[in-house]
């Protein structure tokens, strides 16, 4: 196993077997171990399996800011792993969003791709700003961590894995698209609700809201926007379940 540094964070990868190199890229969930646990590797003998923990997952770091999580960085991460392993050209397997990454890699660096296998992936539009909630500088008093998970090319749905650092405070605001917030770690105050861990709240489109992590805690959660969205500040803000610093 090894660690490769890219864009302020390190990537964890491991190898199994020997032979022609085969790089596996996972989707929005799971990590590099999923391929062996699902039985892929024993069915593909005689190959050098390169198993990557996608950034923000398992033993790889989670750089803050959306710029570190755009598809061009994901492509560069794969190339960095190949370079570190001394591999000039590899066959590649992508699952779900991982297929999008290897599609982009093949389009930009055809000389590095020997073959591609797509499992449950679809083509995606260009990786543009698209109103992404990368910072919301008018809403939050500090930077939040955000990992894009999914974009529906027809529906416009957008899914994100996010983390509020300890002490973050949000102003009143509303989104143009309805969205649930599923708290995975810690607790969040969402208007007068206390949510998490392993619980969710739902806000209709244009509903005024205000949310922040519990005092003394951070929280990690999933945002699921049902369609394209914009954000705007709301004044006065809705009351919050607890005061924030």
Image (cartoon, rainbow, N blue to C red):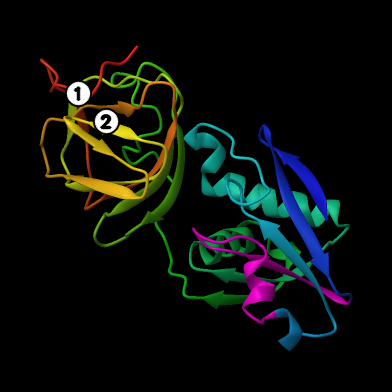
**Place of residue 178 in the rendered image (x, y in percent of width and height, measured from the top left):** 17, 47
Give the residues in magenta: 19-40
Q: Is disc 1 in contact with disc 2, using a CB cutoff of under 8 Å?
A: yes
Find the distance from the CA under tag 1 to the CA under tag 2.
Answer: 6 Å
Seen from this angle, which residue lies furthest bottom? Answer: 43
Q: Is residue 198 above or below residue 238?
A: below
Q: Is residue 205 above or below residue 111?
A: above
**Residue 140: quadrant of the picture:** top left
Tell me, for residue 240, which label it has, or none. Answer: 1
**Place of residue 48 in the rendered image (x, y in percent of width and height, measured from the top left):** 83, 73
Q: Quadrant of the N terminus?
A: bottom right
Residue 135 appears left or right of 47: left
For the point 29% across and 18% down, the residue is 138
Residue 219 appears left or right of 21: left
**Place of residue 58 in the rendered image (x, y in percent of width and height, measured from the top left):** 63, 52
**Residue 215: quadrant of the picture:** top left
Residue 93 appears left or right of 240: right
Q: Is residue 28 magenta?
A: yes
Q: Which residue is mark 2?
A: 189
């Amino acid at each position: 196993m090894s660690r490769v540094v890219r864009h302020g964070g390190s990537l964890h990868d491991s190898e199994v077997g020997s032979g022609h190199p085969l790089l596996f890229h996972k989707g929005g969930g799971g990590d590099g171990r999923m391929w062996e646990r699902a039985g892929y590797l024993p069915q593909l003998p005689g190959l050098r399996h390169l198993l990557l923990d996608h950034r923000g997952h398992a033993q790889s770091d989670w750089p803050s800011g959306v710029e570190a999580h755009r598809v061009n960085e994901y492509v560069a991460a794969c190339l960095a792993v190949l370079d570190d392993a001394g591999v000039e050209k590899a066959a590649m397997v992508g699952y779900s969003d991982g297929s999008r990454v290897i599609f982009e890699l093949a389009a930009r660096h055809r000389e590095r791709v020997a073959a591609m296998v797509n499992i449950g992936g679809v083509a995606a539009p260009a990786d543009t700003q698209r109103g992404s909630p990368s910072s919301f500088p008018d809403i939050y008093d500090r930077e939040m961590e955000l990992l894009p998970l999914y974009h529906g090319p027809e529906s416009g749905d957008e899914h994100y894995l996010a983390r509020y650092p300890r002490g973050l405070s949000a102003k009143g605001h509303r989104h143009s698209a309805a969205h649930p917030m599923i708290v995975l770690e810690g607790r969040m105050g969402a208007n007068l609700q206390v949510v998490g861990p392993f619980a969710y709240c739902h806000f209709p489109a244009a509903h005024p809201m205000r949310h922040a992590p519990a005092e003394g805690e951070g929280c990690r959660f999933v945002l699921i926007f049902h369609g394209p969205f914009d954000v705007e500040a709301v004044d006065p803000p809705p009351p919050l379940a607890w005061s924030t610093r």
